[in-house]
Image: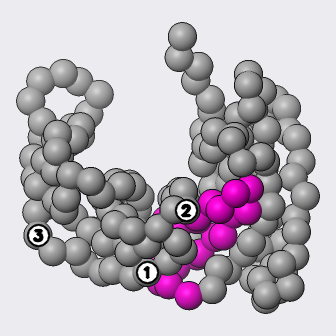
Amino acid sequence: MRRENTFYTKYSLTGGNADCTFNYERNSDLVLSGDWDADGKDTLAVRRGSTYYIKNTLASGIADSSFIYGHAEDRTFAGDWNGDGHDALAVLRGNVFYFKNSLTGGIADTVITYGCDDDQVYVGDWDGDGKDSLAVRRGSTFYVKKIPLLVVLLTRYSVMAKRVILFSLVIGMATAKDTFMVRR
């Protein structure tokens, strides 16, 4: 839970006091969570404009690393896009996603066009393969996008050519690790 720039974390799904409380960055920062160092634990990153500040512990203090990626108006998502255990970032501009497989600035490793500008975007390991991919919600319909590793490797070198990967609709992911929950 966040109140201004103070974070209250719980290590279990129980009530009571926070297990860890700390202050980090500014009230207006966008907060992301992910396993940035592949230690099996999610920690926080904040985005200020197009600069990202990564913290590998749930503690106050300066960021462990920082870098510039994308534009200030981009929407940002975190996920393990290539299955290496490290979460990284993707930015969304219109309906074009720019994926990085490392916590560095520079050119995107993969670029895809997917969904519509006003879709709600979700990230998860929908098929249980250890790699996060995208889903978009349009109205009451979810469209799940699998980003095959082979395609990721091929498009990594064709970013400048703006290779487009068409989306596929997947219905009924019975073996998925991540699933959708509807709140009414």
Q: Above or below — where is 20 with respect to 12?
A: below
Closer to us: 157 or 162: 162
Mark 2 or mark 1: name the one nearer the start of the chain. 1
State left or right for residue 161 relative to residue 26.
Answer: right
Residue 37 in sight in this render = no
* Residue kind at label 2, given as amino acid type: Asp
Q: Above or below — where is 76 with respect to 161?
A: above
Task: Name the secondary structure under disc 2.
Answer: loop
Closer to us: 26 or 32: 26
Quarter of the figure with residue 155: bottom right
State left or right for residue 98 relative to residue 52.
Answer: right
Q: Does the magenta stretch include residue 95?
A: yes
| Number of the front mark, 2 or 1 | 2
Reading the image, the residue beneath label 2 is 74
For the residue carrying disc 1, how many other residues have a C-alpha within 10 Å: few (<14), some (14-19), or many (20+)? some
Residue 169 in sight in this render = yes
* Residue kind at label 3, given as amino acid type: Gly
Q: What stretch is highlighted in magenta?
A: 87-106
Task: Name the secondary structure under disc 3.
Answer: loop
State the separation of the CA atoms marked 2 and 1: 12 Å
x%, y% of residue 64?
A: 25, 78
Residue at screen point 12% across, 24% down? 16
Reading the image, the residue beneath label 3 is 61
* Residue kind at label 1, given as amino acid type: Ile
Reading the image, the residue beneath label 1 is 68
x%, y% of residue 83?
A: 61, 66
Do the numbered discs 2 and 1 sit on residues whose CB atoms are within 8 Å? no
Mark 1 or mark 3: name the one nearer the start of the chain. 3
Mark 3 or mark 2: name the one nearer the start of the chain. 3
State the separation of the CA atoms marked 3 and 2: 26 Å
For the residue carrying disc 3, how many other residues have a C-alpha within 10 Å: few (<14), some (14-19), or many (20+)? few
Task: Name the secondary structure under disc 1.
Answer: strand
